[in-house]
Amino acid sequence: MSSLAGLRDLIKLAARRDRVMLVAWIYVLTILVVSTGYSFKGLYKTAASREALASGITHNAATLALAGPLYNDSLGALAAYKVGSATAVAAGLMSIFIVIRHTRADEEAGRLELVGSTAVGRHTALAVGLLLAAAANAAAALLIFAGCSLVGLPAGGSAALGLAIGTCGLFFAAVAAVAAQVSASARGARGIAICVLVATYLIMSAGAAAGSGGARWLLWASPIGWVTQVRAYAGDSWPVLALPVAAAAAVATGAALLASRRDLGASLVPPRPGPADAAGSLRSPLALAWRLHRVALAGWAAGALVYGAALGSIAHNVGSLLGSGGGVRNAIARLGGQSGLTDAYLAAMMSIFGLVAAGYAISVVLAMWSDESSERAEPVLATAVSRVSWAASQLFIAVAGSALVLAAAGLGAGLSSGLRGSGAGVGVGAQVARLLGAALAQLPAALVVAGVAAALFGLLPRSCVAGGWTALALATVILLLGPTLRLAQWVQDVSPFTHVPKLPGGPGSPVALAWLALIAVALAAAGLAGLRRRDIG
């Protein structure tokens, strides 16, 4: 029997399973790029405003480290600089989730053993994951090309940008395929692949921030750097696209060889057996929840700290970075809700970190469904642990972890902006306090979004994954595009982040925060009540 037997039928099944998730990912990747290109046409209408923006970017190492190098001041090049690297990272995440879902996750849940008992080849599941990820990246690349061309950007640069993002996602699909062979769990495989993704982004950042005499060669050592080296709308260096394609082919071949050397259900790095008896500190549901989430929480908090510091470091000269165009200043002011540009920028950044915290909280809540569907929760609930105490422990980690992520972001932004002399002339300590408060003010709104996932987990568990992430996506779109597009107020009010005070600088509203907290508690209570009454699994 061929090692790829049954490929066509399993591809159809995988596409049917992922039809909602794939459409959502492709839509987000496309709209992120196309909407940026469209908005830049209205925000920077003159060559002088674009030149001022480009000058502010290229003379600031922090801004270069965040998004990569900028090669000229055309509308397309500015849009590619703004979202090219970020969209490539998102494409990498999409590819990692797709491949792990159809390889190690199905293997861990026992689905591959069932499917493998039929006329299915040894490498079919791996090929399904890679081909589905490749198709998703190809669709995203095509739509990015079509969308950017339709909004008036040059067709050649649009094609180059779409292909750069798509081939970057293809490379990380191959990385995920290798990770699926190395780790015995889907969670571990995703962790390995995402660590590689983060490392490549940091390498790109170091190369972009380096001066002319620095380590600019690091851009060529990173797949995210290859996206910037394609130079979309700034010369369109087509041969660079061969690098991610060749690297993806080589890494995917290595994954296939590794898959042929291990048994089904095994891994190249076997898990270490734990002690026969649990330590006293591990004999409660809360201690177990902390043990399971502490590593991921450390990564989220560290990322928020570093990114907050990077964004805070440019607050003092945000005016020069935005250029002379009044449109973008008004957009930042509407998003941040302040008259002062620096405070408006900082308030807008805190709102974005609120979305990040909501993403962390949702991931913790949805881990309960993952444990339930993979039958890891059943042995825990077979003991003296009640359903409510098990779920409440996870929810406590979601709340405390979200607060820690926001505090890390506020601390990083406060220290960097205070040391650089921004913040309306206040000292470092006062600036840290201001931004810590501004960051933590986002917590109730973040918990409302996570509360939607918690309620769905208890009441409609099979819909909790799609519903939770959809709630976050809706809140993100309303927050980022609502003020700029001047959506109707009732539409903007759907997002809990609309009701958060625009801090720092704006008037506080404890009543609004209290109402958001009550809504979050009510959603969590509904989820716990549903969990008590429904069947497990």
Image (cartoon, grey):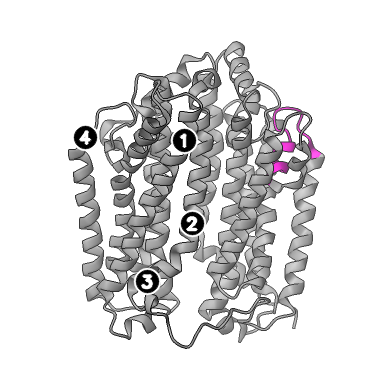
State which quarter of the image contains the N terminus.
Answer: bottom right
Q: Where 462 sits versus 384, above or below?
A: above
Q: Residue furthest right?
A: 239
Tag 2: residue type?
Answer: Ala
The label number, if any, that marks residue 465 in the structure image: none
Circle 2: element type: helix
Q: Indicate which disc, 3 or 1, sits on the residue closer to the N terminus.
A: 3
Q: Residue at point 34% right, 36% down?
A: 438
The part of the chain drawn in magenta is: 224-238
Q: Indicate which disc, 3 or 2, sits on the residue closer to the N terminus.
A: 3
Q: Disc 4 to disc 1, how far (Cα)?
A: 25 Å
Front disc: 3 or 4: 3
Tag 1: residue type?
Answer: Leu
Magenta residue check for 33: no
* Residue tagged 2: 298
Q: Judge from the rendering whether residue 388 lies leftward or rightward of residue 200; answer left or right.
A: left
Q: Indicate which disc, 2 or 4, sits on the residue closer to the N terminus.
A: 2
**Is disc 3 in contact with disc 1, using a CB cutoff of under 8 Å?**
no
The label number, if any, that marks residue 509 in the structure image: 4
Tag 4: residue type?
Answer: Ser
The label number, if any, that marks residue 415 in the structure image: 1
Circle 4: element type: loop
Q: Indicate which disc, 4 or 1, sits on the residue closer to the N terminus.
A: 1
